[in-house]
Image (cartoon, rainbow, N blue to C red):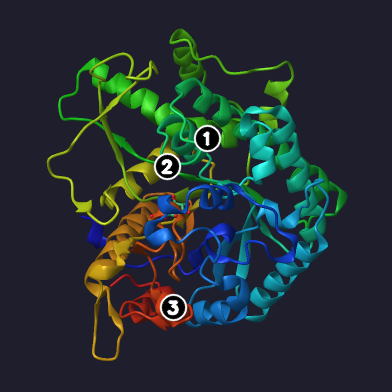
Amino acid sequence: MSDQITKLPDDFFFGAAMSGPQTEGMWQGMGKLENMWDLWSNTDIRAFYNRVGSYAGNDMGARYAEDFKMLHELGLSSVRTSFQWSRLLDANGKLNREGADFYHKMLAAAKEAGIELFVNLYHFDMPAYLFRRGGWENREVVEAYATYARTAFEEFGQEVTYWFTFNEPIVEPEQRYEHANWYPFIHDYARARNVQYGISLAHALAVDAFRTLQASGAVRADAKIGLINCFTPPYTRENPTPADLEAVRMTDGIHNRWWLDLVTKGALPTDVIETLAQRGVTLPVRAGDEAILARGVVDWLGFNYYQPVRVQAPAADTDEFGNPCFADPYKWPEAVMNESRGWEIYPRGIYDFAMKMTRDYPQLEWFVSENGIGIEEHNAARDANGCIQDASYRVPFVRDHLRWVARAIDEGAKCRGYHYWGVIDCWSWNNAYKNRYGFIEVNLQDNYNRHLKESAEWLRKVATTHVID
Ligand code: BGP
């Protein structure tokens, strides 16, 4: 069914998604402060694949001009990256002129290359000194983020049209505070939700600053503000019990509806907050918060899609750490896996979630802000010229997702474009360079030089013709 629609609208845009901490490098250059990734790399470099820490990114800080040209030659018209808070502000929360000049030059180079640079303000990269003061659990840090956002809007208000407050605000609560996968490795469900609440306030304060500065003319009149999240369409077993459906409700509530309600209604979903309270998880709500959250309504949304979430009723009410359990994973027997990453490949999920947004949030415009497949580098075959032969897995992955997107648009979804994650290979957090997402290879043995992979020509064709063949 998904292959019935093979043409995307003419005004549909194609681009590349990336982030400052995963690409720029120069981790101490231009007065940059230590951020969370530098802190973890400095604390325990062994936690990073092949001991490649946060330091070098993919060298884009030195190569952005040529990178933008390469991306433009592939038919892409926009690129999303992030400013690093730790580069743009100094330790007193004031503009770091050297850092700001770096971003001005990057914006100018993008323009010169015919690329519209979308700017996200936060990609899991808090300055370490603010984390030491309590991070998102501390209201002063939430306020510090609002100051950072305001400073960025003031400094770049005439240069940037597309702003985003956060990338995947669900990830730090989960990875740092709930599942203990990332530094500082905490297993505390209530603290994770506290962090999630702090980020929600920070988002709304930033949107508020944006609106005020736009009204005063400091931010351009055609600028838009959005939020980007990794939404996970939720599924459960066939013939579910009420308890399975309850697991779906809470998983969807925390991962998806929390953010969708915030950015469309300026409020958090009451059923989710009530269930949390019944289970002893209370948010640190203060007088006045409701009015702050009400400012969080955005102009459009970024939908990062990698995988669905499959859940069932939990076997126990609490886990081994005493945290409340709302769902257990459900292993779908038919799941197709990307074994390199351990993520399910389920292209239809992008359509199911698109239709959910179309139904439940009909006014919301959005774009696919990340989608991609990362395969372990050592699995990659090369041809006689050394070109990575990736078309057999990368092309079907993107093609299938795009076809489901085309079908959703045909059925009314307000999806405006598609950004592929990591068009140029980049540093993937503690996986470093283990899994490669790129259509363009970054050769670490050859001074980070870039080489087109086999699939690059396919991307160029689709991006320039809008035909998904
Ligand atoms: C998203 C992040 C990106 C990127 C991508 C791929 O969740 O926004 O920063 O890293 O996932 O994931 P990974 O790098 O973990 O393989």
2 or 3: mark nearer the eye: 2
Mark carried by residue 464: 3
Residue that badge 1 annotates: 259
- Left or right placement of residue 1 versus residue 325 in this view: left
Residue at disc 2, secondary structure: loop
Q: Position of residue 333 (x, y in %)?
A: 12, 40
1 or 3: mark nearer the eye: 1
| First of labels 1, 2 by sequence position | 2
Q: Residue at x 32, y 47 (%)?
A: 307
Q: Residue at x 56, y 24 (%)?
A: 194
Q: Is residue 465 visible?
A: no
Q: Position of residue 143 (x, y in %)?
A: 75, 35
Residue at disc 3, secondary structure: helix
Mark 1 touching mark 3, by CB under 8 A? no
Mark 2 touching mark 3, by CB under 8 A? no
Disc 1 marks a residue whose amino acid type is Trp
| First of labels 1, 3 by sequence position | 1
Residue that badge 2 annotates: 231
Mark 1 touching mark 2, by CB under 8 A? yes
Residue nearest the viewer, comparing 120 with 95: 95
The answer to whether residue 125 is above or below residue 310 is below
* Image quadrant where one finds the N terminus: bottom left
Q: Position of residue 96 (x, y in %)?
A: 80, 58
Residue nearest the viewer, comparing 50 with 281: 50
Q: Residue at x 41, y 39 (%)?
A: 181
Disc 3 marks a residue whose amino acid type is Thr
Residue at disc 1, secondary structure: helix
